Image (spheres, grey):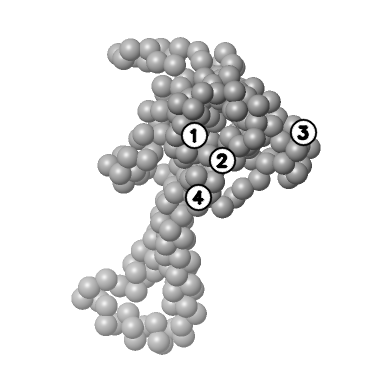
Amino acid sequence: MRCESVRALSSDHKKLLFRLLSNGWSITDTPPDTSRIRALEKVASDARRLRGALNSLEAKDAASLDSNYRQTIPLSTRLLALEELEHDAAALAQVIKGEQADISRLRQKRTAAQLVKTLCMFGIPCSTRNDHDVDARNVTTAMRCVMFSMLEAGSKNLSWSTTASIIKLGIRVQTDPSENRVLPLEGLQAVTQAGEDALRLFMLEEPLWNGIRLET
């Protein structure tokens, strides 16, 4: 990385910088739980189609099928169950989508704050450019560092505009009073916004909590 602020670092500091950067990107290209959402949406779609097909039966065919179900579950009840299944599966998919958005937002905040903290630790100016030109001469050292972090994490969604956005977000998280305010929690020790975000992200990502769905 041909940057004055990096070249000025000692060999040990350079190694530490690149080690921190190589482990600094935690934003995934594919949002979490995408496969679960697709499966639930397919269940809702299939339930809707099956209910529509059953409702399109001739009356005598529906009666014939229903006569076979009288000892178990009537056809009308099965239709109602399919309607409920369609609604519940679609609603659960929406709940997970909302959590998915929260996870992405919280990961971005955490990643941005950590990267900006790393840059400041080594005296690298957290500056960006407005043009986001792909020409290497038009990007800053901070943007190069973020790009290096993305590359090391195997990210495919690479762009200089993303690096600039991450740096700006990190600066805001570090300096905005609303992001650093102390939040009083009843019965618990007061925590900062960052602490609350970390707890929220843990509960969304932790398998035990992630498997629990609130009523929709």
Task: Left or right? Give the position of 157 relative to 99.
Answer: right
Element assignment for label 1 = helix
How far apart in space, not on screen, are marks 1 and 4 (Cα)? Answer: 15 Å
Q: Nearer the viewer, mark 2 or mark 3?
A: 2
Determine the CA span between mark 1 and mark 3.
Answer: 26 Å
- Where does label 2 land, which residue? 148
Figure quadrant of residue 174: top right
- Amino acid type, mark 4: Gly
Q: Quadrant of the N terminus?
A: top right
In the rendered structure, the answer to whether residue 158 lies left or right of residue 60 reads: right
Instruction: Give the mark nearest the N terminus, 1 or 4.
Output: 1
How dense is the environment of label 2, judged by Cα within 10 Å: few (below 14), some, or many (20 and up)?
some
Q: Earlier in the sequence, mark 1 or mark 3?
A: 1
- Disc 2 element: helix
Q: Position of residue 167 (x, y in %)?
A: 62, 30
Crowding at label 4, few (<14), some or many (≥20) Cα neighbours within 10 Å? Answer: few
Amino acid type assigned to the residue bearing label 1 in the image: Phe
Residue holding disc 3: 130
* Residue assigned mark 1: 18
Instruction: Identify which residue is drawn at 59% across, 16% down.
Output: 175
Q: Mark 1 and 2 residues: CB-CB less than 8 Å, in contact? A: yes
Answer whether residue 203 is visible to the viewer in this image. Answer: yes
Q: State how far apart marks 4 and 3 are (Cα).
A: 25 Å
Q: Nearer the viewer, residue 113 or 216?
A: 113
**Nearer to us: label 2 or label 4:** 2
Badge 1 or badge 2: first in the primary sequence: 1
| For discs 1 and 3, the disc positioned in front in the rendered view | 1
Q: Decide: few, some or many residues near mark 3? Use Cα within 10 Å; few <14, some 14-19, many ≥20.
A: few
Q: Residue at x 59, y 50 (%)?
A: 157
Q: Which residue, given by chain and number where applicable, does mark 4 sit on?
A: 154
Mark in the foreground, 4 or 3: 4
